Image: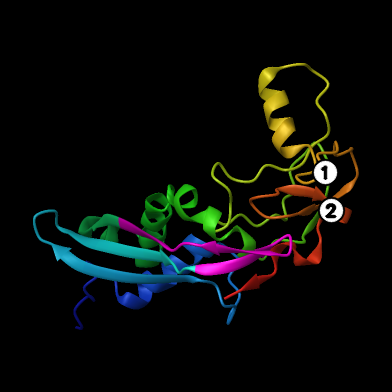
Amino acid sequence: MPSRPDQSFPSDQHLLAAMAPALWGDLYQEGHPYPVRVTVHTSQSFSDRARRVLIVIRVEPHKRLWGKKSFWVEGQEVVVDFLIPEVEMYMSSVPEVIGLHFKKALEGFPKQVAPRLFEFDPRIGNVLQVAESRNETWLPSPLFDPPGGVRFPFPRPQIDAPLYARHYNQWGRCGKCKADLEFGAEVTWGGGHLLWVCRKCLPRETYATVR
C-alpha cells in the first residue's frame, strides 16, 4: 500500500499557484511588462512544526508619463513572512490552506506598494454607472487597489452626515474636474490616483508608461 504523500511541506508549485490570485486577483495579464518581481523562499520551522514562507515583493524603479510629463518612481521592496502549521495541511487541501494564509499575510500590501503601481492597473478605462448599489462585476486586486479598497461611485447623499460627506467628496466626484457624479451617469476608473472620473476627463496620455 503506497504511503500518504507528505503534505507538511507545500511544493513551490503550490506556493506560486496560490500567490498569483492572492496578489493579482483576476487581473493578471500574461506577458504584460509589470515592474514588479516576486520571489518565494521556504524553510522548515521545527520548533513551530510549520513551514515558514518568506515572500519578497519588489517594485522595480520605473518612469511614468503623467499629463505629458515624465516622473521617476523609485523602487521599493516589501518582505512578507508567515508560518503555515503542519496540522492545517491534514485538515484541508494544501492549495486552500496556502491561499488563506497568503490572503491574510498580504492584507497590508496595498498601502505599502500599490501607489507605485496605480498606473499599471488594467482596470483603468473600465466604465461603470453611478448607482446606489455596488457593481458585482468589479474585480478587486490588492496589487492595484488604493489603501482601504475601492468604493463605487454614488450620487450625493440625501442626509447631511460627516461620514457620508467624506466618502462622497472622495468617491462621488470626478477625480479630475471635481464635478458631482450624477445618478445613472457613466464614469471611468482612472486608477488609484484619480479614482472615478468623467469619461471626458481621462486623456489617453495620462497613464501611458515608459520604462
Q: How is the image coloured?
A: rainbow
Q: Is residue 170 above or below residue 113?
A: above
For label 1, the residue is: 177
3 with respect to 147 (left or right): left
Residue 164 in which image quadrant = top right
Q: Residues within 10 Å of mark 1 (few under 14, many from 20)?
A: few
Q: Is residue 106 magenta?
A: no
Q: Residue type at mark 2?
A: Cys
Q: Is residue 27 visible?
A: no
Which is nearer the eye, 44 or 63?
63
* Prevailing secondary structure of the magenta residues: strand
Q: Position of residue 52 (x, y in %)?
A: 22, 61
Image quadrant assignment for residue 191: bottom right
Residue 124: image location, x then y, percent: 72, 61
Whether pointer 1 and pointer 2 mark residues with C-beta atoms closer than 8 Å, the reply is yes
Residue 12 screen position, x and y as percent: 32, 76
**Does residue 38 appear to the left or right of 131 in the view shown?**
left
Segment colored magenta = 62-80
**Quarter of the image containing the C terminus?**
bottom right
Viewer-nearest residue: 85 or 12: 12
Residue depicted at 36% across the width and 55% down the height: 101
Tag 2 residue: 201
The answer to whether residue 52 is above or below residue 133 is below
